Image: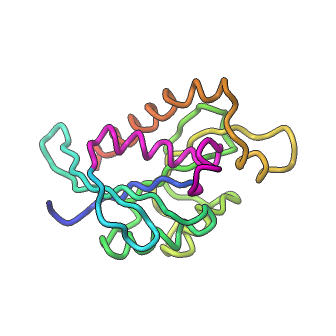
Amino acid sequence: MAEVSVLIAGLGNPGEKYKKNRHNAGFLALEALVERLGAEPAAKLGDSDTWKTEFTRRDGKKIPLVLARPRTFMNLSGQALSKVVKNNKITPDKMIVLHDEIEISFGDVRLKKGGGHKGHNGLRDIIAHCGSADFFRVRLGVGRPDHDDIADHVLSNFSGEEMNDIPGMMERAADMVVKWLEEK
């Protein structure tokens, strides 16, 4: 396989306790992509689990991919991902991060390039450790709580009803990444 040219990273917190938390929407979307793209486990790189595969666009161009999931807590995502970025010579325009987003309604999925972190500590750490905010993001809507405790909201589990909608949301996220790859 040629040198890796695109990084797809999913954000969340490690461990069974956090598996169904809103903050782990990025991990859930990454799992959907690993399956859809047929990515194979690769060697752990620093504090990240990685998978590798190759994406073939409709025009036949092959794009080598690395998919990564930090094994650190959310607030240290950049520390973990910076090793993957440096090892694979990833530039910000070839990086897409899947993450939870309280500023959009539950179930909504949006693509964005660059911007600030808006208080999202995982994005804050990626910007700090990777040296740029100019990467792409797939924002997975988890909704804004009706109270001021944002941390409590993102660290709480999806409701039973929301869990029923998660597979469709993750498929929409995977579709968005595939469309993004087609345009690379």
Indicate left or right for 65 with 149 as reference. Answer: left
Q: Residue furthest right?
A: 147
Q: Is residue 32 magenta?
A: yes
Residue 105 lies in quadrant:
top right
Task: Indicate the position of residue 7 as horizontal and vertical percent values.
Answer: 36, 59
Position above or below: 133 against 29: below
Q: Is residue 107 magenta?
A: no
Q: Which residues are magenta?
A: 13-39
Position above or below: 181 against 115: above
Position above or below: 73 against 27: below
Q: Residue at x 30, y 66 (%)?
A: 43
Task: Indicate the position of residue 24 as horizontal and vertical percent values.
Answer: 58, 48
Task: Indicate the position of residue 124 as horizontal and vertical percent values.
Answer: 62, 66
Q: Quadrant of the N terminus?
A: bottom left
Q: What colour scheme has been applied to the protein in the rendered image?
A: rainbow
Q: How many marks?
A: 0
Q: Residue furthest front?
A: 16
Q: Nearer the viewer, residue 139 or 154?
A: 154
Q: Residue at x 79, y 49 (%)?
A: 152
Q: Residue at x 36, y 67 (%)?
A: 44
Indicate left or right for 103 with 179 as reference. Answer: right
Task: Indicate the position of residue 53 as horizontal and vertical percent values.
Answer: 24, 52
Position above or below: 116 against 169: below
The main secondary structure of the magenta stretch is helix
Indicate left or right for 23 with 144 as reference. Answer: left
Indicate left or right for 50 with 55 as reference. Answer: right
